[in-house]
Image (cartoon, helix red, strand yellow):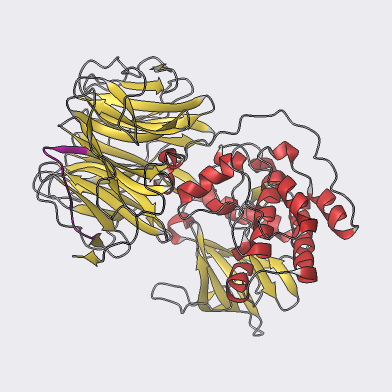
């Protein structure tokens, strides 16, 4: 609840029920929050469901159910719910408006909290969490920006992604702000009260020090730190250090409960032991769909490839290309194997090869099984370790254990022709793969047992050449591009079409990925013969975002999305015949610097990741060599 709302824009309502709307306080994946006034002139916050979701009976029911649950939360230390209902088919929720800066803004402006003020902040926010949990709610997005430093003390806000506790313990998507997500949520496990305890402790570290408990310039590094590293408690006062360290334990069963924390803070007692022990689980980061995590598998690389203190200029090769075992590379994807960043490549010879990203040296034996070219490879992680999914001209989808180099499942069959593209994601706790084929269908596979999920999507008029998996709020979706030039968005679970644009390109759509421009999830497509542009689409509506990105003189066959340090969203594309790799600033809608030159032949595929905690682009083509390019700052100006 910011005290500085932006003005209403064209299309924003001016009144909801009896409440006059005067500004916009914020927007998210499910709704918009407006600043309003009651008929008596009292300021209130009015949250409405997005118009695109208002027609969804399930979304309306969930919104109103959450409003009813939120109304049960005790009013102290939280923004009290005042009213809820439906206006012109759109549900709304009204809560008290708390004027004041967020904790995040206050620390950024005035510095860390200290002394009694810090202790009061810790106790007040814990008391609010206790009230929330007693109402049967898990907040799931507690963070400094959701703590408002109001005139009467701190107030916890934003139950927009909270769920009824009973629902939260049956399944969970990757929902929340990365720097404050607990390891179990990153692992795809259910959200519980211990997840809020973790987020509370991370928020208190920021309040006490001004830095995050798990720092990092890009999301991938932050997620890696949460999963594998100790929190940075530098600057935390001594009387809070052990308490916050216990709350930031990787295992949720080892974290103290809220009641025990309050006792320790208010009665100056030592921290009580953890809650009743739960079965320990291996905490491994599970795959989450979308560009936000596209770079994560390579983010764990700790190889000292870059010289200490030295900068490899943007667009320069990080190392000399090394000829691998494949004479023609058709697809590349990044992963982590035995604590080393690796590149997994699919070859024209029907093999998958794994190589050390830092050196290019082969890792293990080639993965054999496809009878013909491997057109597409995607990677992810299961509790047992990293895996790869491949699609080939033999019409099969295959799943590989990268640790052992053996198949995880029997070949997945069902397509009647070549599998042109594969992508990985999750449906609740289940890892899945999506595949697009020249038989005109998109299929989804359960990677726990190889069974098909839902019915094949058959909306394309001809070959499906590219697929990518993303999320719209809590809903996983698959974006696909076809030889017919269409870009379509379908429900990942059912195959039902959600949005689409016929003739999105003036030729085939050769490549697809998903990303984020500000708060907007987007699909990104690359054009083939007759249209060599990269285009950006709103993932919810398939409406174009900005102008086409032009520069390639050949098909944009390789395409990947990522985020550079500083939060700059980019897409990286490879020109099939023009031998260039290009980087596009998605917010500016322009090319970032000039083309990367060095390929001698066709470029088939690109990926984005991190090497030694520095951003890189990776490309592969018909010369059998993988090239690794620096995306390190300082960045050149965006042009075009």
Task: Indicate the position of residue 423 as horizontal and vertical percent values.
Answer: 35, 35
The x, y position of residue 491, in whole percent, is: 40, 41
- Residues in magenta, as a range: 592-604
Q: Is residue 280 magenta?
A: no
Instruction: Decide which of 534, 544 is in the foreground and name it.
Output: 534
Q: Is residue 50 above or below residue 183?
A: below
Based on the picture, tell me whether residue 603 belongs to the magenta stretch: yes
Q: Is residue 47 above or below residue 385?
A: below
Residue 227 visible in image: yes
Residue at point 41%, 38% (across, down): 492
The number of discs equals 0
Measured as percent of width and height from the top left, residue 608 is found at: 33, 44
Instruction: Please state, as top left, top right, bottom left or bottom right, where the N terminus lies in the image.
Output: bottom right
Foreground of the two, 87 or 1: 1
Seen from the viewer's position, the closer of residues 519 and 355 is 355
The quadrant where residue 66 appears: bottom right
Q: Main secondary structure of the magenta part?
A: loop
Furthest residue in direction bottom, as rendered: 41
Decide if residue 542 is in sight here: no
Residue 403 in the image, given as x and y percentages of width and height: 45, 22
Instruction: Say whether residue 99 is left or right of residue 512.
Output: right
Residue 199 to residue 104: above or below: above
Tell me what residue is drawn at x 29 percent, y 23 percent: 352
Quarter that holds the C terminus: bottom left
């Amino acid at each position: 609840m910011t005290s500085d709302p932006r003005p209403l824009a064209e299309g924003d309502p001016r009144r909801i029920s009896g409440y006059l709307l005067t500004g916009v306080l914020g927007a998210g994946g499910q709704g918009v929050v407006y600043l309003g006034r009651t008929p008596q002139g009292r300021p209130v916050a009015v949250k409405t469901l997005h118009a695109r979701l208002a027609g969804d009976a399930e979304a309306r029911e969930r919104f109103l159910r959450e409003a009813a649950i939120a109304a049960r939360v005790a009013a102290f230390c939280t923004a009290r719910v005042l009213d809820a209902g439906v206006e012109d088919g759109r549900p709304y929720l009204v809560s008290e408006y708390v004027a004041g800066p967020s904790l995040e803004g206050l620390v950024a402006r005035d510095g860390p909290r200290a002394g009694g003020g810090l202790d009061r902040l810790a106790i007040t926010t814990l008391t609010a969490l206790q009230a929330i949990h007693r109402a049967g709610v898990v907040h799931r997005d507690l963070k400094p920006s959701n703590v408002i430093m109001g005139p009467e003390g701190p107030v916890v806000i934003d139950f927009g992604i909270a769920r009824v506790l009973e629902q939260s313990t049956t399944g969970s998507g990757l929902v929340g702000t990365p720097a404050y997500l607990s390891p179990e949520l990153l692992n795809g496990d259910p959200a519980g009260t211990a997840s809020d305890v973790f987020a509370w402790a991370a928020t208190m570290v920021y309040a006490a020090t001004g830095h995050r408990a798990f720092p990092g310039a890009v999301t991938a590094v932050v997620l890696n730190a949460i999963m594998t590293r100790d929190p940075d408690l530098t600057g935390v006062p001594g009387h809070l250090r052990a308490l916050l360290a216990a709350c930031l334990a990787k295992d949720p069963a080892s974290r103290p409960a809220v009641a025990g924390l309050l006792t320790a803070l208010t009665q100056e007692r030592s921290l009580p032991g953890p809650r009743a022990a739960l079965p320990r689980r291996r905490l491994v980061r599970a795959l989450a769909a979308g560009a936000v995590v596209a770079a994560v598998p390579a983010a764990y690389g700790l190889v000292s490839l870059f010289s200490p203190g030295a900068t490899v200029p943007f667009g320069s090769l990080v190392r000399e290309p090394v000829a691998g075992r494949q004479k023609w590379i058709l697809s590349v994807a990044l992963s982590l194997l035995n604590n080393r960043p690796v590149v997994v490549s699919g070859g024209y010879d029907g093999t998958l090869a794994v190589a050390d990203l830092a050196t290019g040296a082969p890792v293990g034996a080639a993965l054999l099984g496809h009878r013909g070219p491997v057109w597409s490879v995607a990677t992810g992680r299961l509790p047992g370790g990293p895996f790869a999914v491949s699609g080939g001209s033999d019409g099969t989808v295959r799943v590989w254990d990268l640790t052992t180099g053996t198949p995880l499942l029997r070949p997945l069959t069902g397509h009647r022709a070549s599998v042109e593209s594969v992508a990985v994601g999750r449906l609740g706790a289940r890892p899945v793969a999506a595949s697009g084929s020249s038989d005109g269908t998109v299929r989804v596979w359960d990677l726990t047992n190889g069974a098909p999920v839902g019915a094949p999507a058959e909306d394309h008029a001809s070959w499906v050449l590219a697929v990518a998996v993303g999320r719209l709020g809590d809903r996983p979706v698959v974006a696909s591009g076809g030889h017919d030039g269409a870009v379509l968005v379908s429900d990942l679970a059912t195959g039902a079409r959600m949005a689409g644009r016929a003739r999105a390109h003036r030729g085939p759509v050769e490549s697809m990925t998903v990303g984020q421009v500000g708060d907007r999830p987007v699909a990104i497509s690359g054009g083939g013969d007759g249209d060599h542009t990269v285009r950006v689409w709103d993932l919810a509506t398939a409406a174009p975002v900005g102008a086409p990105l032009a520069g390639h003189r050949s098909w944009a066959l390789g395409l990947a999305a990522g985020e550079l340090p500083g939060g700059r969203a980019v897409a990286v594309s490879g020109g099939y015949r023009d031998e260039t790799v290009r980087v596009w600033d998605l917010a500016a809608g322009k090319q970032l610097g000039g083309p990367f030159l060095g390929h001698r032949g066709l470029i088939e595929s690109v990926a984005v990741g991190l090497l030694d905690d520095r951003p890189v682009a990776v490309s592969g083509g018909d010369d059998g060599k993988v090239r690794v390019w620096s995306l390190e700052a300082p960045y050149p100006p965006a042009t075009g």
